[in-house]
Structures are given as structure tokens and as C-alpha cells.
Image (cartoon, helix red, strand yellow):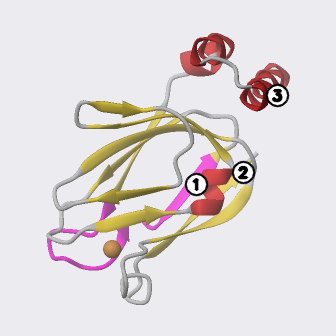
Amino acid sequence: MKAFILQLLLLLCLGLIGATPAMAANLSGDLLKQPATKITVSLGNTANELKFEPNHLELKAGKRYQLHLTNPSQLKHYFTAKDFADDIWTQKVEAGKVEIKGAIHELELKPDGEAEWVFVPLKSGNYSLRCSIPGHTEAGMTGEIVVSN
Ligand SMILES: [Cu+2]
């Protein structure tokens, strides 16, 4: 854990001084060697119900996750958890043949869309998740992400 925190501090410092991605990747080597825990969250379902399945996630700070997001419905949906996104280190988001590196705040998934979000939660906390399409949060398309130490 101590090594992890040191690495993180280095990463954060490098972020501030504008380090090259290669330097950051080198320093985060140990984090990247950690096998990622796979979690799948479905945005909506085939019955077009406005909900996340599951709508409750329990994560550990300092662990690496591969969050597989899928949208099996006929509507577009958002995965919006901005406070959570502020408190994680995103390694990448992969969608189709594109990999996006760096901080991500929100993802929109079109019908039949899929994306992988690989990240490490940095802090414990309770974070809210919602779909920010008008009417969807109100209809119950919400969730909770709990990060513990
Ligand atoms: Cu939605």
C-alpha cells in the first residue's frame, strides 16, 4: 500500500508538471501489472427499463478495475458519476478500436454500445451514479458506488 501511495504521488506530481505519458506509464508499471477485477454494468435492459444493473458497486481503493459498460436497450444512456470520476485514476477507456487515455468524467452509450473503463479508485467514499438523459434520473436510473479502503 505504501508503494502504491508513493507511486500515486509521483503520478500526481508528474501530472502537475506535465510529464510525458511514457514517464507516467513507466512509474505506474506496478499498478498496471495488478490484474484488473472485471465488473459489468448494464445501462438499461432489453425491456427498456430505466435502471442500472447492478445499481450498487463495491470497490476497494488502490485496486485496479475493468468496468465493462453495456447498453442492451434501444435508448441512449449516460454513466454519470462525476465525483467518483474525480477520485479515480483512469488508465484508459476502450470503445471499438479506440483507446482514450486520461481523465474521463462521463460516458454516453448508444443502443448496443459497449465500453471498457480501466481505473484505480484512489479514495474511499460513497458516490452517486445516474443517467443524465432528461427524465432518466427521475425515473430511477440511479446507483451508488461505494469505495472502501
Ligand atoms: Cu438513461
| C-alpha gap between disc 2 and disc 3 | 20 Å
Residue 56, above or below 132: above
Tell me, yes or no, whether the two marked residues, 1 and 3, touch with CB atoms within 8 Å: no
Residue for point 69% across, 49% down: 87
Q: Amino acid at mark 2?
A: Ser
Residue for point 65% across, 12% down: 23
Give the magenta part as a residue range: 42-59
Residue for point 43% across, 82% down: 137
* Helix, strand or loop for disc 1: strand
Q: What residue is disc 1 on? A: 58
> Which marked residue is nearer to the observer: mark 2 or mark 3?
3
Q: In the figure, is residue 149 to the left or right of 134?
A: right
Q: Amino acid at mark 1?
A: Glu
Residue 9, above or below 147: above
Residue for point 30% across, 32% down: 98
Q: What is the x, y in percent for residue 16? A: 77, 32
Which part of the image, by quadrant, shows the C terminus? top right
Residue 99, above or below 68: above
- Whether 57 is among the magenta residues is yes
